[in-house]
């Protein structure tokens, strides 16, 4: 096992990579769905490379980033700091950083399996304060970290205001296709006015938005093999008597995780707890969102119940609530959500909230996972010990 105690990443000064050719300037409209999740999503992709030098790999990444930005020009700018967020398309470029470490790339697998977040976060550049750039105003940050074996890690920070999971994966696939000299399979659709609020705005559905002490929070990852997932679904449907009550893997797993989390945290029976999960709304609009839509098509849907009802009832109760919630996502619900966000200009409260997002349908990688699901959880240390036991199904 590698010694990770003195792991160091040395970064060079960041550069701005501009589009290869002239692009449109000015403010680029972001929809209300784009406003709702103002976070930077960080991901890592690691590659073994024995045929290229580090400098050649960096130049290739930089060159084709410049080319793909011509197609994705709205990310070549900065998020506006006040009021409703838009992108100020300046054409200056996006942040790219070159870095290196003396470790071997195999240590990445160890850091992931051991949940060493303090190490993994070094692979995505964090803009220093003296640069006078607000991290939250950046649309895209790319860091290329080279290992002494010749491999490298591409660490990305992508603004959720600009990309949801589907749009982000399509951007990465397009970047790769450009580097291989292929035409874009899914050219980006950049007009974000389709999911615009109605006039006048009209809220037609409830949108559960508003509703511990300092314990050390710990990360853990859990792998649910295919047989575990099937067992879960069997446990859930044992009280059902017809095929109309079939549930998806996501619904069964989410119901199970929600119930288990309440048990592990030891909430009082009357404690109000909230579930939030991201539902893909693109296919729910009557006027369909075009393929390649480069923006947020997801909606966060919420459910508030008491802990006692979750813990005191069978698993089928918890899963049934998730199933009913998922079935609410229609064109009317999406339009109501957009109008709600227009009228309230708010972000969802995360107090006493379990937030779940699934990346299983994204095309960020095309690996055969044999139907298994890997999940990452963050809980206070004492609760995590109980939660780990509940995961043994």
Image (cartoon, helix red, strand yellow):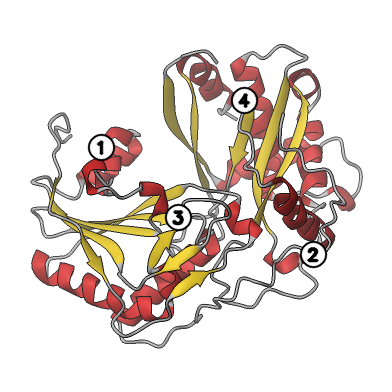
- Left or right: residue 284 versus residue 95 is right
- The residue mark sitting in front, 3 or 2, is 2
Taking depth in this image into account, of 125 and 273 the one nearest to the observer is 125
First in residue order: circle 1 vs circle 2: 1
Image x and y of residue 37, in percent: 56, 49
Please give the residue where the numbered disc 3 appears in the rendered image. 159
Query: What numbered label is drawn on residue 198?
Result: 2
Q: Identify the residue shown where x is 41% and y is 88%.
A: 183
Image x and y of residue 342, in percent: 71, 54
Query: What numbered label is drawn on residue 261?
Result: 4
**Local SS, label 1:** helix
Numbered circles on residues, count: 4
- The residue mark sitting in front, 4 or 1, is 1
- Left or right: residue 354 versus residue 388 is right
First in residue order: circle 4 vs circle 1: 1
Q: Quick check: 331 above or below 265?
A: below
- The residue mark sitting in front, 1 or 2, is 2
Q: Quadrant of the C terminus?
A: top right
Q: Residues within 10 Å of mark 4 (few under 14, many from 20)?
A: many
Please give the residue where the numbered disc 1 appears in the rendered image. 119
Image x and y of residue 284, in percent: 76, 65
């Amino acid at each position: 096992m590698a010694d990770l105690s003195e792991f160091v990443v040395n970064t060079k000064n960041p550069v701005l990579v501009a589009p290869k050719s002239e692009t449109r300037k000015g403010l680029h409209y972001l929809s209300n769905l784009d406003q709702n999740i103002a976070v930077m999503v960080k991901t890592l992709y690691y590659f073994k490379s024995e045929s290229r030098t580090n400098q050649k790999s960096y130049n290739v990444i930089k060159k084709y980033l410049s080319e793909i930005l011509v197609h994705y020009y709205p990310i070549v700018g900065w998020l506006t700091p006040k009021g409703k967020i838009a992108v100020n398309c300046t054409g200056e470029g996006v942040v790219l950083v070159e870095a290196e470490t003396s470790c071997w790339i195999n240590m990445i697998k160890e850091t992931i399996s051991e949940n060493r977040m303090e190490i993994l976060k070094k692979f995505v550049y964090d803009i220093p304060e003296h640069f006078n750039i607000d991290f939250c105003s950046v649309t895209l940050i790319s860091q290329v970290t080279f290992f002494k074996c010749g491999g490298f890690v591409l660490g990305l920070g992508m603004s959720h205001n600009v990309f949801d999971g589907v749009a982000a994966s399509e951007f990465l696939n397009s970047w790769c296709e450009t580097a291989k000299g292929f035409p874009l399979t899914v050219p980006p659709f950049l007009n974000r006015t389709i999911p615009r609020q109605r006039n006048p705005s009209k809220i037609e559905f409830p949108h559960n938005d508003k509703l511990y002490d300092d314990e050390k929070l710990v990360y853990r990852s859990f792998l649910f093999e295919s047989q575990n997932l099937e067992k879960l679904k069997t446990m859930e449907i044992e009280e059902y008597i017809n095929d109309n009550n079939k549930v998806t893997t996501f619904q069964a797993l989410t119901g199970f995780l929600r119930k288990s989390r309440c048990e592990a945290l030891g909430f009082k029976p009357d404690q109000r707890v909230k579930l939030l999960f991201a539902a893909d709304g693109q296919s729910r609009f009557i006027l369909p969102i075009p393929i390649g839509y480069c923006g947020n098509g997801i909606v966060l849907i919420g459910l508030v119940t008491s802990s006692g009802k979750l813990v005191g009832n069978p698993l089928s109760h918890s899963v049934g609530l998730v199933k009913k919630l998922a079935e609410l996502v229609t064109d009317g619900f999406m339009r109501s959500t957009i109008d709600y966000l227009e009228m309230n200009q708010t972000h969802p409260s995360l107090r006493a909230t379990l937030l779940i997002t699934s990346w299983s349908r994204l095309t960020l990688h095309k690996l055969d996972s044999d139907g298994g699901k890997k999940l990452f959880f963050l809980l206070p240390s004492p609760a995590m010990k109980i939660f780990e036991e509940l995961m043994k199904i």
